[in-house]
Image (cartoon, rainbow, N blue to C red):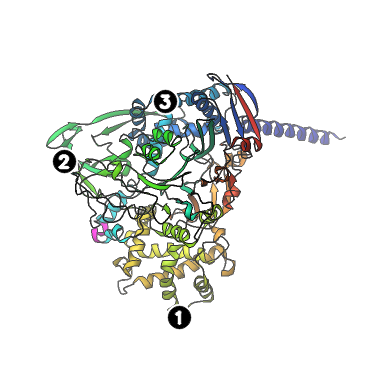
């Protein structure tokens, strides 16, 4: 062998060794956090043995002999799968994300600290029962046992970000009340945008963007009437919609739930369905779990990573699920600041001291930044967060009021009947939910469990803060909140729509979701005399659009009037004209429709708003839809006239036509001129993104993100795959789970989540349910022990 060849072979060998060493190093980082689901180990603090069975999806079924052992094992088991996600959510609620992601997140941390979530947790903890405290303490100790024994085997994110988790404290589980309350609250992101629009365009135009709720007939609690004639409560009556300065939502949260009574079920017993619509990402928000103390407790369903109890699910006696009430649970006040003392504000003719907190925010590289937060008796001064110059605006938020959702879910896990259920539900205040119910005795029901403030007027607009006139007086009493029990039609249902009829004496909200999903759900519930689990699966997957049903005749009429369509436009119109209104992934018409809707929105609103305001406006997602709906129902609007063409007055028909032509041009550019080749699923896709997955090299090395998956549906269908109007058509949120519970035989119940049980990207259970989720395929949710053992893939025995 020549010297050159020897050198080449030597260099090649060295490179191969380097590659193998690098691969081994990366592989070790990726897999070292994978837990062992089999075997036997000692768990400090146990009184008796605990058995953890895991099924084919690694979902744990935990059997213990007492509550202390059960929740200690739950903490250990959950930490096996979701430790980094638990720490991430904890840091978010504490305002400590900068410590791991860098000081650039200081504004996010400061805003989260202004919510005083940890203060709320301490308040709730102090009033919590001893049994619940004991369970939370056992859970925390189980988590900490796992942390202490796995510091050299932590999930990959800890290595990538260069830190170790701190011990879990019981109150950290209570922080999740604040996390969910903030994630589901409504009036945060819209007020500045609409205030800017009002300043630029006037109140009359902005008023058309605000829903007139009395016009919408589909209500959750149909038939519920409240007579306050014999009480001394001053109710806030429905009022005509006023020009809006601040109302909206931060992230749209839709959900569906329904239940049928035995007379509408093929089993002769109630069946209940639930799918809560939240952000879709990896790892997913929910942790599937079944826990049992034989003879005392047997409950299965969904838990939040970091909390020990089942939030939505069933036990041996009842099943329950949730949808967001969409309550207006946040008000804003303009404060008068003392010119001689920036830490005082005027209230009822006197200068009052603010609470002042100096917050030190630490960065991942040791940087320190000190910022000041100020609070009135209502809450934080939020002007800086919202970009409101030269004004001091404070915020009162339901998340700072007393509530105890941890108590609620603890008691729901143990409820045996409607009375137990409603007793549990009464402390659902900060996280306002429509709680659906079904039991083995044949009963069904639905209860609006919410913190509904009683205040002067309807809560819209920035109110004068120098007087107590607009302060919250109290909350609507639980007994007077809308509810139904065993209604004569044999079913209950909700989909974030209007809560109660117009004669309900309290103001709940203006910003319910439009009724397209609830109308379709009730249409399907009425279509069959009796329904089955398979029928419920089809309902979960249903992509027929009532929005399309309502608007399409007007669209077709406007487009048919055009006499100069080119061949591509003619083909697109033919697709819409023959379309059945189903948002199928392999159809062209849904793509044409969605692009037309976006173009219509742009045609109507952009010319008056301009680029910047328009982007802010459509980022809200409810305001634009209500604006379009109002204009559609009116048949025309001042918004329809293009201010850039003063010689021409455009109407709604003109905008429909222009939007259609623009949509065809857009889709032709993306998918070619052949309309038959257009597919909704080719542009409408779901990608499950990991929090660290935005760094492409890390995603490529550790396979953090999953997808994309072609999907149908949209935000206006029962089977939802929603997107942000500023970033069409990347799916951002949808059904965070699908559950169907059969009270006739709990083992017939079915479920699926978008991701998987594990939060560790190298795990085979990280996103093992995703393809089935996209295909609307479910798996069993066994709770009978012999079936659990028969279908167990792993068994872990925990010993004292």
Q: Which residue is mark 3?
A: 131
Q: Position of residue 196 (x, y in %)?
A: 28, 53
Question: Is 224 displayed left or right of 149 in the figure?
Answer: left
Give the numbered dot on residue 275: none
Mark 1 crowdedness (10 Å alpha carbons): few <14, some 14-19, many ≥20: few
Name the residue tied to disc 2.
467
Of residues 448 and 531, the one nearer the viewer is 531
Question: What quarter of the picture does the C terminus occupy?
Answer: top right
**First in sequence: mark 2 or mark 3?**
3
Task: Examine the rendering and report whether any part of residue 762 can be seen.
Answer: no
Give the residue at x 44% y 32%.
90
Q: Above or below — where is 479 with respect to 675? A: above
- Main SS of the magenta part reads helix
Q: Choose mark 3 or mark 1, whichever is in front.
A: 3
Q: Which portion, as a residue range, is magenta?
A: 200-204
User: Crowding at label 3, few (<14), some or many (≥20) Cα neighbours within 10 Å?
Assistant: few
- What residue is disc 1 on? 563
Tell me which label, 1 or 2, sits earlier in the chain.
Answer: 2
């Amino acid at each position: 062998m020549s010297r050159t060849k020897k050198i080449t072979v030597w260099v090649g060998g060295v490179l191969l060794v380097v590659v193998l060493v690098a691969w081994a190093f990366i592989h070790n980082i990726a897999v070292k956090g994978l837990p062992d689901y089999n075997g036997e180990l000692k768990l400090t603090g146990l009184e008796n043995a605990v058995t953890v069975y895991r099924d084919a999806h690694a979902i744990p079924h935990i059997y213990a002999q007492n509550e202390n052992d059960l929740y200690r094992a739950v903490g250990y088991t959950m930490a096996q799968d979701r430790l980094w996600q638990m720490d991430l959510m904890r840091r978010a609620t504490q305002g400590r994300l900068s410590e791991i992601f860098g000081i650039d997140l200081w504004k996010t941390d400061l805003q989260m600290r202004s919510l005083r979530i940890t203060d709320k947790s301490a308040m709730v903890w102090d009033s919590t029962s001893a049994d619940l405290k004991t369970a939370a303490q056992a859970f925390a100790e189980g988590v900490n046992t796992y942390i202490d024994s796995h510091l050299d085997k932590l999930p990959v994110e800890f290595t990538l970000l260069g830190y170790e988790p701190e011990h879990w404290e019981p109150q950290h589980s209570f922080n999740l009340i604040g996390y969910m309350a903030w994630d589901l609250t409504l009036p945060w992101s819209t007020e500045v945008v609409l205030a800017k629009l009002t300043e630029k365009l006037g109140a009359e135009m902005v008023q058309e963007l605000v829903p007139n709720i009395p016009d919408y007939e589909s209500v959750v609690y149909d038939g519920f009437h409240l007579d306050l004639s014999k009480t001394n409560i001053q109710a806030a009556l429905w009022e005509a919609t006023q020009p809006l300065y601040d109302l909206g939502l931060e992230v749209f949260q839709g959900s569906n739930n329904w239940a049928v009574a035995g007379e509408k079920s093929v089993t002769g017993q109630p069946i209940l369905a639930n799918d809560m619509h939240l952000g879709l990402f990896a790892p997913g928000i929910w942790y599937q779990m079944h826990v049992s103390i034989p003879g005392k407790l047997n409950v299965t369903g969904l838990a939040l990573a970091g909390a020990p109890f089942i939030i939505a699910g069933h036990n041996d006696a009842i099943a329950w699920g949730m949808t967001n009430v969409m309550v207006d649970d946040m008000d804003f006040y303009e404060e008068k600041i003392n010119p001689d003392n920036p830490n005082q504000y005027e209230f009822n003719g006197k200068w009052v001291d603010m609470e002042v907190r100096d917050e030190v925010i630490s960065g991942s590289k040791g940087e320190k930044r000190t910022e000041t937060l100020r609070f009135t008796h209502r809450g934080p001064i939020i002007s800086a967060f919202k970009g409101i110059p030269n004004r001091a605006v404070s915020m009162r938020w339901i998340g700072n009021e007393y509530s105890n959702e941890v108590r609620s879910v603890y008691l729901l896990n143990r409820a045996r009947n409607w009375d137990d259920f409603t007793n549990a539900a009464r402390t659902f205040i900060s996280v306002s939910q429509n709680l659906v119910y079904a039991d083995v005795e044949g009963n069904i029901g639905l209860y609006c469990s919410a913190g509904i403030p009683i205040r002067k007027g309807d809560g819209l607009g920035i109110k004068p803060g120098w007087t107590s006139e607009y302060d919250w007086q109290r909350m609507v009493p639980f007994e007077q909140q809308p509810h139904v029990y065993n209604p004569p039609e044999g079913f209950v249902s909700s989909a974030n729509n209007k809560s109660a009829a117009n004669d309900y004496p309290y103001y709940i909200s203006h910003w319910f979701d439009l009724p397209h999903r609830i109308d379709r759900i009730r249409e399907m519930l009425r279509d069959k005399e009796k329904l089955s689990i398979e029928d419920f699966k089809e309902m979960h997957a249903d992509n027929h659009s009532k929005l399309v049903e309502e608007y399409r005749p007007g669209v077709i009429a406007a487009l048919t009037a055009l006499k100069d369509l080119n061949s591509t436009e003619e083909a697109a119109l033919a697709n819409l004209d023959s379309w059945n209104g189903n948002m199928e992934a392999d159809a062209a018409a849904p793509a044409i429709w969605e692009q037309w809707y976006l173009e219509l929105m742009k045609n109507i609103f952009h010319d008056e708003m301009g680029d910047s305001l328009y982007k802010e406006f459509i980022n809200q997602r409810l305001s634009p839809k209500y604006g379009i709906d109002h204009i559609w129902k009116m048949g025309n609007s001042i918004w329809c006239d293009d201010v850039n063409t003063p010689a021409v007055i455009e109407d709604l028909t003109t905008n429909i036509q222009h939007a259609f032509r623009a949509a065809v041009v857009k889709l032709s550019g993306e998918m070619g001129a052949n309309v038959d080749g257009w597919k909704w699923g080719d542009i409408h896709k779901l990608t499950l993104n990991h929090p660290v997955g935005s760094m492409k090299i890390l995603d490529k090395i550790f396979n953090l993100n999953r997808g994309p998956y072609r999907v149908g549906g949209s935000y206006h269908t029962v089977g939802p795959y929603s997107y942000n109007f500023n970033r069409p058509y990347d799916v951002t949120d949808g059904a965070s789970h699908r559950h169907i519970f059969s009270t006739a035989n709990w083992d017939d119940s079915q479920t699926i989540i978008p991701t998987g049980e594990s939060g560790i990207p190298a795990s085979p259970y990280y996103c093992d349910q995703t393809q089935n989720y996209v295909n609307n395929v479910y798996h069993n949710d066994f709770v009978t022990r012999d079936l659990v053992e028969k279908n167990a893939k792993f068994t872990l025995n925990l010993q004292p």
